[in-house]
Image: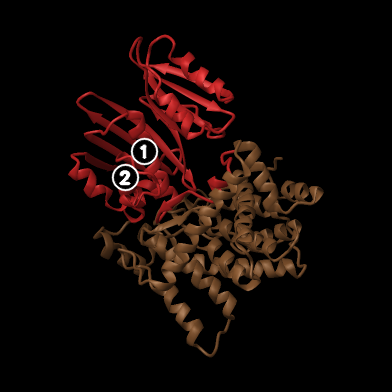
Amino acid sequence: MNFTSVSELVELAESKGLPISEVMIQKEMEWMDRTRDEVFGQMEENLAIMEKAVQKGLHEEIHSSSGLSGGDAQKIRRYIQESSVLLSGADVLDTVSRSMSVSEVNASMGTIVATPTAGACGVLPGCVFTAANRLRADREAMVRALFVSGAIGYCIANNSFISGAAGGCQAEVGSATAMSAAAVVEMAGGSPSQSAEAVAIALKNMLGLVCDPVAGLVEAPCVKRNAMGGAIAMVAADLAMAGVTSVIPADEVIGAMYRIGRDMPTSLKETALGGLAATQTGREWERRIFGKPEKE
Amino acid sequence: MKYRSVFDIIGPVMIGPSSSHTAGAARIGQVARTLFGRKPRQVTVTLYGSFAKTHQGHGTDIAIAGGLLNYDTHDERIVHALETAREQGMEITWIESEEVPEHPNTARLRLEDEQGEMEVVGISVGGGKIEIVELNGFELKLSGSAPALLVTHHDRYGAVAKVATVLADQRINIGYMQVSRKQKGSEALMIIETDQHVPIAVQEQLSALPEITGVTVL
């Protein structure tokens, strides 16, 4: 059982009549020489840690030491409960608040699961826990969703990149968004090729996104990009479930992401030299936090 | 294939905020500590590229210090690692290099104490994964495409055979192996890439062998 691209993964799954999650589980067992219980058990533990992080940011007052992030997940949760008008709808906002919560926990040096990275750790839990509520999915379906996202992330990581320093935010939050879209498609009963369409649609909308964190901290704009990544993933999954397909297939979108990242200047790859980090306000925050002189 | 396991993607479980700049940095520190085999008294850390530009913001310095204290990426004590290192008498000097490295997230760690010194260059490739590219001036050819064992040992006859025997008994196949030493009879290093995952029990078995001074799995 092996695959190196999304198209190979879909072909393998559909020819054997298996969901993507099962292909990933069997590959992991075979290649890492581990039992099903070991592999499934470790993923269940990851899910439990994600759940704690989701709850923490929604129900506790958390703030990062810099003061750049924290408290917004709670703000959104209250807004969902109390506001009579929700412009984008309760499920989208639930996703956004959960994704934001995990990302805020990360910024405050809390415990999270990197999915695929810490900078993008909010997107997947936000989507999986919201979809589980909506679909009344059981624990097994949620763990399986993590294997689906892992399978997509595996293809992206080995054919492109997943770190902001290497490929910009498109490689981090972009990858997480694509992985999450595929995961919730399987949770909703979609086919492997629908998961692949969701990957393509989600990632296309993140292409070109640069990594320009204020003061070099994984906070602004990272926390809000995680939140919006969650929203994009859910909408992309819905489009794929509706039968919408991407003109450019998933693997080619991943290839485009790689080339765009390679061409991206260093100032926009997690160096805090360009983009939002280099704005007047960004520099003011940087000076306030570190007392550092302005960089060129 | 740089990433092999689904848990390279959905994982590691870690203390935030950055998998490359925090978790990866902690792992570089921890691998350096393990290879050194004991707590260093003095460490000089040179940071390059994105590491040099953003290490304070990402807690890269805190994480490397945590790794040097032998903390795992998910150990909550990492948060206080800089203070703990100071309390334990570990002196860490930080250098931000302007040099443009081959990889954006590169750190060079020089560990010292009364008994000796060691220098390691590590890169953090993303998602918490790292590669060690240099050890005491030896370029390492760790492709990162397979699990790798780094075994430090005394340069005596039989050391290599004993390690190979343990792996053979566990049906772990060696795909690539490199043995290097500074001089005859001194400290030596085995780099072993395996086709199968090396369970913790086997790592412990290897550590307990005579002549073996340290075992690290990458």
Where residue B102 appears, x then y in whole percent?
A: 45, 38
Write the residue at 43% across / 78% down: A75
> With A197 as the anchor, is A95 left or right in this view?
left
Mark 1 is surrounded, within 10 Å at the Cα level, by few (under 14), some (14 to 19) or many (20 or more) other residues, namely: many
Does A294 appear above or below A5? below
Q: How is the image coloured?
A: by chain
> With A138 as the anchor, is A283 left or right in this view?
left
Instruction: Specify the subunit that label 2 lies on.
Output: B
* Circle 1 SS class: helix
Write the residue at 72% across / 48% down: A9
* Residue A222 visible (yes or no): no
Query: Which label is found at residue B66?
Result: 2
> With B101 as the anchor, is B114 left or right in this view?
left
Between the C-alphas of marks 1 and 2, the distance is: 8 Å
* Circle 2 SS class: helix
Where residue B211 appears, x then y in whole percent?
A: 37, 17
Q: Quadrant of the N terminus of chain B?
A: top right
Query: Which label is found at residue B84?
Result: none
Q: Are marks 1 and 2 on the same chain?
A: yes
Does A14 appear above or below B70? below
Where residue B95 appears, x then y in whole percent?
A: 28, 42
In the foreground, B8 or A176: B8
Q: Which chain is red?
A: B
The residue type indicated by label 2 comes to Gly
In the foreground, B175 or B163: B163
- Chain A pictured colour: brown
Write the residue at 25% across / 48% down: B82
Q: Earlier in the sequence, mark 1 or mark 2?
A: 1
The residue type indicated by label 1 comes to Gln
In the rendered structure, are the residues bearing label 1 and label 2 in contact, judged by CB atoms less than 8 Å apart?
yes
Q: Which residue is mark 1?
A: B30
